[in-house]
């Protein structure tokens, strides 16, 4: 029997990689797309199947995570085997500017979706995209037993989603899991997250289109992994008979400064000649250091990271250089696959 999955946030970085992974495993994949006045499906255009395609296995639905009735109706119709809740206002700095919106979309929507599962009578397994941001100021290394101390409205919203998931598992026996994922990046990473901001700037500086890159806190420590590997961990979590929560990380750390140094060096550039400080990119409260302990995921899921930060920076710089070359050549912009 072909399995059916529903992905919220399918147009995002992780959603696009997860859709590819599940299609490759023979799933029928449904995705929720927000209505936009411009195209917002660039990351999934290469796997798009139109309504006229016979036997299509990838189907998009217009819906919004804030519309609980739409979620109930969709789940009642689809009765998926697996639901991956990846949709979120996922930018930490933006969550300080739009805290209530972030609380609604990133936090309350996790509960809306779980209620929609109950109301629709769906027997689906549910994956909740929890985040290392929940650990906030708890010192590293962080694992599944580390107490949460979030440092942003985004982190608070994710803590709410985490506990809603645990509560629905305990209260109603829903097969719901939390993946506590540390930062993971790729050529499809949103352009305003720090790694992609750096690698895009490297490409533009190398091409002579830009000279300066303005960044905020260079001392922040992050555990950066490769997104395509992390969506594999999501899938593995839902294949376990017992629902549980898992940290997914590399266990290795670098500062923002080190990432910049590596990325610039990859293009034979000296980062100190180009990077400048702008307090605009500081946050009212910062998360100083996130370094995950992925031991449980390794032991129970058989999951291990392969790409480490230096290789990751290289992958991203090369993809941004290729994409810019395409743009400058006037060709159709290509997303690196
Ligand atoms: P992303 O690229 O920002 O994608 C977010 C997705 O959510 C997009 O598809 C976005 O749609 C969708 N979305 C936003 N608001 C929505 C709404 N109201 N209704 C329906 N969909 C909505 O994020 P990502 O990096 O792929 O991360 C996926 C999930 O993992 C997120 O929940 C994030 O918070 C969490 N997470 C990410 C990381 C990481 O390092 N990447 C680490 C831990 C946890 P549009 O395309 O229309 O904006
Ligand atoms: O790339 P960032 O914006 O990612 P952040 O805040 O760690 O959040 C990401 O990872 C979380 C998992 O831990 C996810 F849950 C979340 O959805 C998102 O994907 O910032 C990384 C660090 C921060 O300490 C920030 O202060 O880089 C620092 N930074 C310094 N200059 C900057 C900049 N961040 C951004 N976005 N832009 C800057 O110019």
Image: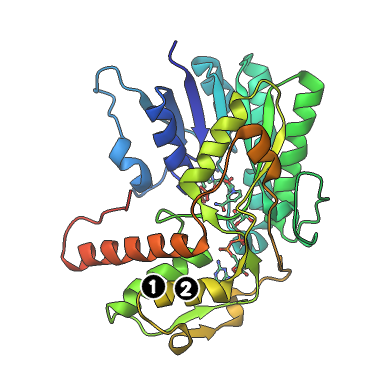
Whether the residues at callouts 2 and 1 have beta carbons within 8 Å, the answer is yes
| Disc 2 CB within 8 Å of nearest ligand 2 atom | no
Residue 143 visible in rendering? yes
Determine which residue is flagged by label 2: 262
Q: Where is residue 335? Give x, y as percent.
A: 31, 53
Q: Which residue is mark 1?
A: 266
Distance between mark 2 and mark 1 Cα atoms: 6 Å
Assess disc 1: are there few (<14), some (14-19) or many (≥20) residues with their C-alpha within 10 Å of its C-alpha: some
Ligand 2 is within 8 Å of the C-beta of the residue at disc 1: no
Q: Residue at x 46, y 57 (%)?
A: 190
In the rendered view of the protein, which quadrant contains the N terminus?
top left
Q: Residue furthest top?
A: 1
User: Which quadrant would residue 216 be assigned to in this image?
Assistant: bottom right
In the image, what residue occupies the spot 68% across and 59% down? 291
Up the image or down, 73 lies above or below 160; here it is: above
Residue depicted at x 80% and y 59% = 138
Residue situated furthest bottom in the rendering: 273
Is residue 69 visible from the viewing direction of this image? no
């Amino acid at each position: 029997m072909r399995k059916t999955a529903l992905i919220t946030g399918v147009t995002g970085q992780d959603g696009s990689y997860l859709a590819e992974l599940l299609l490759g495993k023979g799933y029928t994949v449904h995705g929720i797309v927000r209505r936009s006045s411009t195209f917002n499906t660039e990351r999934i255009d290469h796997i798009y199947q139109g309504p006229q395609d016979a036997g299509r296995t990838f189907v998009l639905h217009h819906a919004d995570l804030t519309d609980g009735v739409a979620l109930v109706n969709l789940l009642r119709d689809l009765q998926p085997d697996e639901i991956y809740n990846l949709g979120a206002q996922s930018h930490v700095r933006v969550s300080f500017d739009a805290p209530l919106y972030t609380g609604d979309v990133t936090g309350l929507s996790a509960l809306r979706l779980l209620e929609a599962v109950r109301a629709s009578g769906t027997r689906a397994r549910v994956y909740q995209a929890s985040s290392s941001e929940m650990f906030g100021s708890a010192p590293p290394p962080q694992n599944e037993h580390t107490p949460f101390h979030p440092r942003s409205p985004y982190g608070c919203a994710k803590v709410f989603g985490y506990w809603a998931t645990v509560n629905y598992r305990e209260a109603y026996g829903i097969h719901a899991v939390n993946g506590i994922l540390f930062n993971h990046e790729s050529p499809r990473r949103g352009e305003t997250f720090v790694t992609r901001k750096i690698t895009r700037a490297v490409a533009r500086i190398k091409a002579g289109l830009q000279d300066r890159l303005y960044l905020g806190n260079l001392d922040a420590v992050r555990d950066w992994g490769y997104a395509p590997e992390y969506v594999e961990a999501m899938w593995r979590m839902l294949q376990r008979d017992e629902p549980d929560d898992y940290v997914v990380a590399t266990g290795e750390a670098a500062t923002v400064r080190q990432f910049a140094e590596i990325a610039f060096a990859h293009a034979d550039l000296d980062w100190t000649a180009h990077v400048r400080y702008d307090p605009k990119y500081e946050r009212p409260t910062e998360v100083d250091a996130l370094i995950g302990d992925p031991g449980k995921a390794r032991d129970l899921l058989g999951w291990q990271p392969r790409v480490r930060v230096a290789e990751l920076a290289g992958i991203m710089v090369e993809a941004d250089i290729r994409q810019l070359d395409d743009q400058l050549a006037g060709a159709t912009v290509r997303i690196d696959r």
